[in-house]
Image (cartoon, coloured by chain):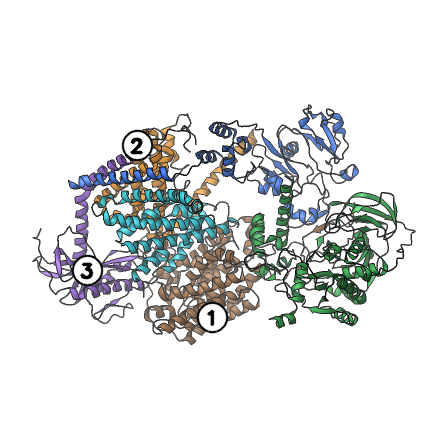
Amino acid sequence: MAISSKKMNPYDEMMKGLWRDNPVFVQVLGMCPMLAVTNSAINAIAMGLATFFVLVGSSFLVSSLKRWIPKQVRISVYIVIIATFVTVVDYVLLATVPAIHKELGAFIPLIVANCLILGRQEAFASRYPVKLAVMDAIGMATGFLLAMFALGSVREILGEGKLFGVSLFGDNFEPWVIMILPPGGFITLGLLLLLFNWVGERKQAFIAQVAEAERGKA
Amino acid sequence: MSKQDPKLLLQPAPLLRQGMTTPAAMRDVWLALLPATAAALWYFGLAALLVLVASIAGSVLTEWAFTPKERRAITLRDNSAALTGLLLGLTLPPALPLWMAFVGGAVAIGIGKLIWGGLGANIFNPALVGRAFLLATFPIAMTSWTVQQGPAEFFTVHASNLTAPFMQAPVMDTLSAATPLGQMKFEQSATPLWDLLIGNTAGSIGETSALLLLLGGIYLFLRRDLDWRIPVGIFASAALFSAILYGVDAERYPSALFTLLSGGMLLGALFMATDPVTSPVTPKGAWVFAIGVGFLVVLIRVFGGFPEGMMYAILLMNAATPLIDRWTQPRVFGRNKGGSA
Amino acid sequence: MGLFFSLRNSFDHGVHPRHHKEQTAELPIQRVPFVARYVMPLGQHIGAPAKPVVKVGERVQRGQLIAEAGAFVSTTLHSPVTGTVRDIGPHRYIDGNFRPAIEIEADPYATQQLPPRPAIDWQGLSIDEFIAQVQAAGIVGMGGAAFPSHVKYAIPEGQQIDDLLVNGAECEPYLTTDHRLMVERPEAVIRGTEIVRQKLGAKRATIGVEKNKPDAIALLKQHVGELPIEVLGLEVKYPQGAEKMLIKAAYNREVPAGALPRDIGVAVNNVGTVVAIADYFDTGMPLIERVVTVAGPGVAEPANLIVPLGTPIREVLRFCGGLKESTREVIMGGPMMGTPIADLDAPILKGSSGILAFTASETGRPQEYPCIRCGRCLEACPYFLNPSRLAKLGKARLFEQMRDDYHLMDCVECGACTFACPSGIPIVQHIRTAKDDLRQQKVRSEKQ
Amino acid sequence: MSSGLPIMEKEPSSTTLVAALAIAGFLSGIIIIGVYLATFDTIAENKARELREAVFRVLPNVTRMQKLRYDGSELVVLPDNAKDDEETIYGGYNDAGEFVGYAIVNAGPGFQDTVRVIYGYRPAERKVVGMWILESRETPGLGDKIYKDAAFVANFDNLGVDPEIVAVKKGTKSRANEIDAITGATISSKAVVRIMNEAHKKWDARLPVTAPALQQAAE
Amino acid sequence: MDNLIWIFISALLVNNFVLAYFLGLCPFLGVSSKLETSFRLGLATTFVLIITALCSWFLNTYVLTHAPYLRLISFIVVIASTVQFIEMAIKKLSPALFQSLGIFLPLITTNCAILGLAIFATNRGYGLWEGLTFALGAGAGFTLAMVLMAGMREEAEIGSVPALVRGTAFNLIISGILSMAFMGFAGLFSST
Amino acid sequence: MNELLTAPAIMTGLGLFFGVILAVAYKLLRVEEDSRIARTEELLPGTNCGACGEPGCLPFAQKLVVGEVEPSKCTVASSDDIDEIADFLGVDAGEAEKRVARLKCAGGKAQAFQIAEYDGFESCRAAAVVSGGGKGCSWGCLGLADCGVVCDFDAIQMNDNGLPVVDIDKCTACGDCVDACPKDLFELLPLSRKLYVQCNTPLAGESVTVLCSVGCDGCAKCAADAAPGLIEMKNELPLIHYESGLPVTPKATSRCPTGAIQWLEGGQFVEEESQNESRYAQLH
């Protein structure tokens, strides 16, 4: 994990968050909001966007200010920065979309405790230039948002037969209530991870197969 | 050297084995469940049979689909997947849409058993995982009970049974009935014990007939397929707890006998809690487990939100089983309780 | 409780395998003829191997000392036959490994008569002299473990043996050697018991015999006479003959884990051992032969035989009409704890109580199913261990955890758990594997 | 994993650390207060509207309301922006400013979590005239019918409170003080009833038939 | 008193912090592989929760009445600093206690269960005793869930869980089943 | 406007208050500990494999910091990592010659026969406790892959001949296979020791050759062909004295009648593998 002098490409930094280092599926970070507010796609997206704003904002600030933050109190300062952004998000949501704010409830303040955000500050933003830090944050936050959306839509589709509140299968659909209950969250995310692992494994196997075939030819 | 000899086998001692095998034990459970299943068909007709078939199909197909080819033959031969399906089916209401029973069977095997690594590795009772999933997923369908029709109307199948997959079951107020536990909880009216004993009540397919379930349990006990401590412990602790409550307020709380004979108590205590895989293996642990189940059943039935608590009680104690096992190791010969010599 | 217990005369748990003794229970003991070649492994007893005192090419007499004890926990070897020492070097042992042994070629023209010696006046011996005599006779526990007997008689300062327990339980299926000895030579059993009892200063002696041998019990009772020896019928249950189980059954006392019977004032000897002691003091014959049951479905003519030690198993089987075509496995010892024999040229040892041959229908691994935690093994284990757990940990190779948390080392490998397992899991083998691994690690760490 | 940093760094003085924290706190305080002030009016407005809507929903024909608080002996009028507490209820008035009824909020344990109920009560008739759920986490599809099922909510449109409200099995409602419980969600139904009964017990004696007159001018 | 009992039971079983509110999932999924560690982490968390309840009550009563908008940031700062202070104190005063419980403290501070407790307690307007009961129930519930989970995971570890399932996916699914079992406590003591 | 001031004031106050408290606590309550230990542990691979002889990475780090061990003792870390640790601690990395696990047996299914058929679960040690596992040579490899099972680095695979093939790139010389082998056949040797005796049988002459076609029969021809003093016959097996500094050449293998002594360029049984592969290629 040493800082290498190699040139780092901002685009790569952004893309890695989407799949290879996906914060949810690979790093298993930010599980609390991931499960708590994904009972509908819209909540998931709202939460994802809030997290996005906080992560990108604080990465920008931390990266810009890193020279002036003494190492010993860096964590405290990061927390203060993050908490400030979260408070801002909290009030803005409350003022603009009170209905969604009510649904997300206590989980907006809890963004502060999302280990993804503090983790990125400590591991990335505090060491790299602003541009890279922001791209990294955008990538990670987008990866998080996508994962939230995936889980939220699965749970909403099965749990209510709807997506974004629009009924998909007609009135007669039997909703799978468990999907919007806590156990459903755990089990669905578990199964999604399983799927993610399976796809990864198939991909590996495929690559190995191709390599084998090429070696055979040679 | 001794080339002229037959090449000898080196199979470690002991060479002698007793006769029982694991598939045979599973067959015993099937046999033990037969009378109660037959009674269910008598009371609930073809509908019950269809639900049972659907849940068994869900279990067996899932087991087949997710088991590596080379192990399929063995895992299906041990009868355990079908048994899980049957046990699940017996806990379902007779009018349940068949597709739900199928989903239940699939979940029971998939999440309840296969992800743990198959037979013997699971911590939770698979049939009950399936049922808990169904109850949380389709709460209305899972609590719509029907009155018994008797053998005269054997061939009637409920409209709700035949609901298309993923669709809602039609409301069926005409046939609906409350279970004895539901009546107890919400109306404080106790069903006569005789009706509970012979099974003349509404309820899950397999839980109604107390007498025949007991018969099956006795058979299993005689075949040494169940740990007698578990049912005895459950009955004793549940009876004691509810007797105390009954003593406090006989109007509000059910009597001990009612507690023992109603709902899934017998089916659960004799066939679910005794599942060896998910209950403690140590004798002392079996007692702890059983007393825990008995206590939780009454707690949930009397003070909780659900009229029936057997399933949750067993699942909760299943979760505690690894801990119970660890803390109740038997006293080793020649050692004191602490394990020192 | 005490009364109830004394009526039962058994230990807790255990299993009830069919005893299969009908094949040989009624057959009188015969003597096998001498053969051409004998192999005497130097380490056929527990403890240090014996040290050869003969050289290659040296002529030896039947009963002559050929190896002396290598240490106190070790014993002597005597030539089973009159002949010539052909080789001293690695020979295949019953477990397939090569071990140092003395190979003796029998002299076909020798009479094979034991040189006559006067009876030894055992009553005049001090305990130390007695111990030396027993060691000189090369006598070991004849039940199977082959623990040098004289070591058992060396009672440390401050300890006192109150009870001598003679083990005639013979709980292993098929085996009838002890049974035949008790029926054919009850007087020798009683005499041997009395010798040991007096020398150890025990107040009483008890001969424990499983109740499936009523003839033996009756005969022994007849021969007891006025001696302070009790003949006790025991419940037929496996492993009744395990030392600590027997003590529990006879006296309802538990030997603490890791301790020896003598720590609670008991000494245990096998019937075969006391007979060997009686014979040595009566005739001066050291331990050069023993009674062996040859049985099992794979043997043409089952028999109870007196076999000179070192006789190749192949020759013993040949005397019994050879192996049937269908034989798949030959075991030395009982079917519950015996050792599978890898090579029929391996010799009969001091601890060989039986040679059993099995056909395909008894052998062959049972189909193994996953453990369903039915708990039958826990109910079988006479030591109250948790075999199900041990097997599971063994499979995961968590050997240290087996030792530290689940008392692996208390297991005596009686096989009751494996017998009881409906899933066909080789529990004992997992346990043995773990013990072997830990033993090797210990040896390694001591080396370092 | 902060390699690349020199191993022995000069320790900054304690004052620097304290100052860094203080400055961070100061700056964040400024940002937060800025956002707070900028959004304050909207949020207050949202909250007030939400409350008004709830009150109007449970009290038919009510178009105006004011906060009332029981100060130990009588109800006193509070300004709209006063903080609510357990002793606060709402008076509902019609267009003409005439008193219609009280809106009372109470909370208690439901099937899953706390349920917050507001209901309209007309002391003159001793009747509940409307009920609405402000907050609950009841089971979707079952317990959530306490506010999703219009038929259940309609139970409370004209409901007697004497001797107390009782939930009975669906279809067996026969008296003025009875409501039809929801099939399959008896616990949630009963929880609503219990919460209302509790509130009624507390407020019954305190509520005069006519509330203090509307103080604010119509908006 | 009834109210306190319900708060306790609710936080312990009905609305278990981990299994119903999804709070404290990171340690729940991450540190629950060993029983011993889980139990100690549970105890340490309970301790921090109680400290949190005290701090948040203090802040709510004396500071936030003047500046409600500082709720989040002051909770975070105060709780983190207090815990850090306690950590240092324990390390100094009782190294043994530090080894068994103290090493978890930094981990716990960033645990959302802590902040969640403070926020829930404020939202519900809990007083000092209610807050403490809530913290105790939540901590006990967290410990219970951790210990059950660790027991199951240790068992599964030596079992035959397929390689593909092993890891977080497996942990999530068994948490799901456990959460399903805890649903049995729904409505406990609220219906009678 | 009042509020505009309270917020920053309270926040500054809190910052100051806790800043001071923590600063004071830091001074008063600080427990001295070597921060380099944590840092060193971070640099270590964290596999806790025990190859270094310590119970885990942390104890190893503690010893590293006080200079009791050399960084190169960690066989799992890459040489870059080792250098980094050495740099960080300002010590010499130490001689770090790569060692790999070597098997003292080449008697696979094709070379050594079974006298009896083991019928139990797949584990060398389990077979070994059942009458030795039935292999004719009781010192030889049983081929049931205990070493492969215990290898944390996936470096040991069984070949078709029933012998474990060590992937020398993956092997970290952690010693797990050495511990697992019930016949004590594995040893950890520097890769540079190319002359190697693949046999462990203390028998000599014909009694070896009847058991295994590649066993060492103790003929001592290799000793004769090598530099005098390099190879000594001990227990009927050649013992190669690498420490003598004498030249080691493949010549010692030339007259070996059984092929028990081999010149290893890389892994063991490689030739055998390539033969198999060519056979396979011919088939297709």
Spatial CA distance of label 3 from label 1 is 54 Å
Which chain is painted in green? C
- According to the image, label 2 marks what residue? D16
Between residues B132 and D190, which one lies in front from this camera angle?
D190
Q: Colour of chain E?
A: cyan
Q: Secondary structure at mark 1?
A: helix
Which chain is painted in purple? D
- Residue F171 location, x and y as percent? 57, 34
Which chain is painted in orange? A
- According to the image, label 1 marks what residue? B39
Labelled pair 2, 1 in contact (Cβ < 8 Å): no
Q: Colour of chain B?
A: brown
Q: Is residue C52 above or below residue F205?
A: below
Q: Nearer the viewer, mark 2 or mark 1?
A: 2
User: Neighbour class for label 2 at 10 Å: few (<14), some, many (≥20)?
Assistant: some
- According to the image, label 3 marks what residue? D104
Q: Secondary structure at mark 3?
A: strand
Q: Amino acid at mark 1?
A: Ala
User: Neighbour class for label 3 at 10 Å: few (<14), some, many (≥20)?
Assistant: many
Residue E179: image tag: none
Q: Colour of chain F?
A: blue
The chain under label 3 reads D
Q: Is residue D199 above or below residue F239?
A: below
Q: Quadrant of residue E83?
A: top left
Q: Is residue C349 visible?
A: yes
Between residues C115 and D192, which one lies in front from this camera angle?
C115
